[in-house]
Image (cartoon, rainbow, N blue to C red):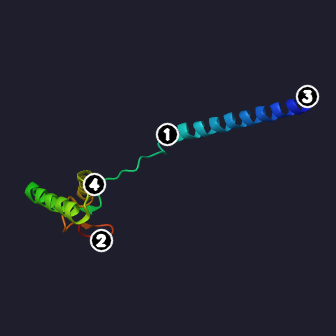
Amino acid sequence: MQVMAFEYKKKKWKLIAYIVGGAILLIILLIAAITGQLQENSCDNSTTTETQLDSKSMTENAKNIYAHWKQKYGATPQAAAGILGVLQLESRLDPKSVNSSSGATGL
């Protein structure tokens, strides 16, 4: 009988410890959120030097890149569209673009 009582007390203290620990973490997160310590990282390309391509050039580059991935690698339309999305985000489909912070060039 005492063994069962000991196991019950052990589980009871374990549960209490989890509740207290969770409450402390919740309080820390709330304080950090209220004081502005939690900030969302932005994924914008503010360090990329953007060259101005007209929409015709971008469209032409997009068509060429799409055809290349479909023909050479057998990419599905969805995969080729995903690749185009990443390239547009990174370089605006401009092969002459330069990242000012890292010096990376091209698509």
| Foreground label between 1 and 2 | 2
Q: CA distance from mark 3 to mark 1?
A: 48 Å
Residue hosting label 2: 103
Q: Nearer the viewer, mark 2 or mark 4?
A: 4
Q: Could you give the CA–CA distance between mark 4 and mark 1, rounded to whole angstroms? A: 38 Å
Q: Secondary structure at mark 4?
A: helix
Report whether 52 appears left or right of 29: left
Q: In the rendered image, which quarter contains the N terminus?
A: top right
Q: CA distance from mark 3 to mark 4?
A: 65 Å
Crowding near the residue tagged with mark 4, few <14, some 14–19, many ≥20 C-alpha atoms within 10 Å? some
User: Which residue, given by chain and number where applicable, does mark 1 sit on?
Assistant: 33
Circle nearer the N terminus (2, 3): 3
Q: State the image coordinates of residue 59 (x, y, percent, origin top left).
A: 12, 56
The amino acid beneath tag 4 is Ala
Residue 87 appears at what percent x and percent y?
25, 59
Whole-number angstrom distance, CA of label 1 to CA of label 2:
35 Å
Neighbour tally class for label 2: few under 14, some 14-19, many 20 plus, Cα within 10 Å: few
Residue under numbered circle 3 = 1
N-terminal label among 1 and 2: 1
Residue 20 lies in quadrant? top right
Residue 84 horizontal/vertical position (percent): 23, 56
Mark 1 burial class by Cα count in 10 Å: few <14, some 14-19, many 20+? few
Question: Under tag 1, what secondary structure?
Answer: helix
Up/down of 84 relative to 106, above or below? above
Q: Is residue 1 above or below residue 29?
A: above
Q: Is residue 78 left or right of residue 27?
A: left
Instruction: Indicate the amino acid at tag 1.
Output: Ala
Lower sequence index among marks 3 and 4: 3
Foreground: 107 or 5?
5
Which one is nearer the viewer's eye here, 6 or 22? Answer: 6
What residue is shown with label 4? 79
Does any portion of residue 16 appear in the rendered image?
yes
